Image: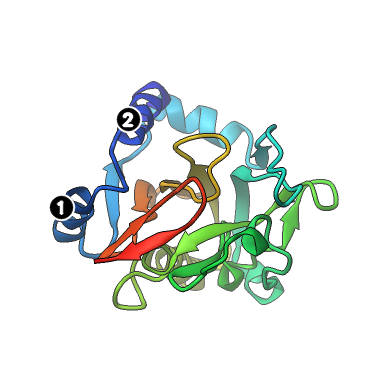
Amino acid sequence: DFIDLYLLIQETKRIDFSSKEQIRKLALKYPFNYKEIGKLDKRSLKIFLKKTDYYKKSEIIDHDTLLYKTLIIKHKIYHGDFKNGCTLKNLPGWNGIKNRGIYHKTHIIAKELGGKRTYGPPGEYYNGFIGTEHANVGVTGNSGMRHLEYLIKNYLCNNNKDYIVYECRVIYKNPKDKIPIFIVIIIVSSDYLINKIYFVWNIQCRYTINYTNGEFVAW
């Protein structure tokens, strides 16, 4: 249920994602850079589906960029949305990263799934964050968040009258950090055939990241 999920998120936040040893362990245990956590129980499903559009942003402003961070986007996705996806321009915090070698402008709701640039009132909730290459597309180019996007796209292509309720939570270790440490994704289809929760690690194999300022070191 959501209490268990909250506790698991808090427990996972205690992991030292800047540790070389920890990165090695995660890379070996989860070669596709995501972990399937489980599914929502019946009670949590009812709560989850009561509100299919929900957004949350950080209240703390990053004074280097004068921009906020989007923390949660929850949205209903249809097959017909695919053609409406937008690229990410003016990503909050992007210009504050000096060396962007391992980073991608990462959609919260993928462009391929019809992800807009912003949601809610104009400019209120930006549909993106600074993700590592391996969080976005994985080591192989089709894992990480991209694999989960394919899961949704394949389902909707085969069930084009149904929809997916998709929630993505971007988790930061500390409120003022520029880089999140992991991403929580909840995917529920309208027929309940898909009911899954995933954690995606915002790490890069063979690199140590300073999540506060975005600097990184290869090893």
Of tags 2 and 1, which is closer to the observer? 1
The structure residue drawn at horizontal position 40% and vertical position 61%, both measured from the top left corner, is: 216
Q: Residues within 10 Å of mark 2 (few under 14, many from 20)?
A: few
Left or right, 81 with respect to 140, comes to right
In front of the other: 123 or 94: 94
The structure residue drawn at horizontal position 56% and vertical position 34%, both measured from the top left corner, is: 175
Q: What residue is disc 2 on? A: 8
Q: Position of residue 26 (x, y in %)?
A: 21, 53
Rendered position, 122 above or below 79: above
Q: Quadrant of the C terminus?
A: bottom left
Rendered position, 125 above or below 127: above
Amino acid at the residue labelled 2: Leu
Q: Position of residue 44 (x, y in %)?
A: 44, 28
What's the CA distance linking mark 2 and mark 1? 18 Å
The structure residue drawn at horizontal position 64% and vertical position 59%, both measured from the top left corner, is: 96
User: Residue 134's mark?
Assistant: none
Residue 10 falls in image quadrant: top left
Amino acid at the residue labelled 1: Lys
User: Residue 25's mark?
Assistant: 1
Q: Quadrant of the N terminus?
A: top left
Considering every residue shown, the one lying at the far right of the view is 122
Q: Position of residue 101 (x, y in %)?
A: 46, 73
User: Do residues under tags 2 and 1 come within 8 Å of each other at their CB atoms?
Assistant: no
Question: Which structural element holds mark 1?
Answer: helix
Q: Residues within 10 Å of mark 1 (few under 14, many from 20)?
A: few
Question: Which structural element holds mark 2?
Answer: helix
Left or right, 92 with respect to 27, comes to right
Left or right, 20 with respect to 203, comes to left
Q: How many numbered badges does the structure rendering display?
A: 2
Residue 43 falls in image quadrant: top left
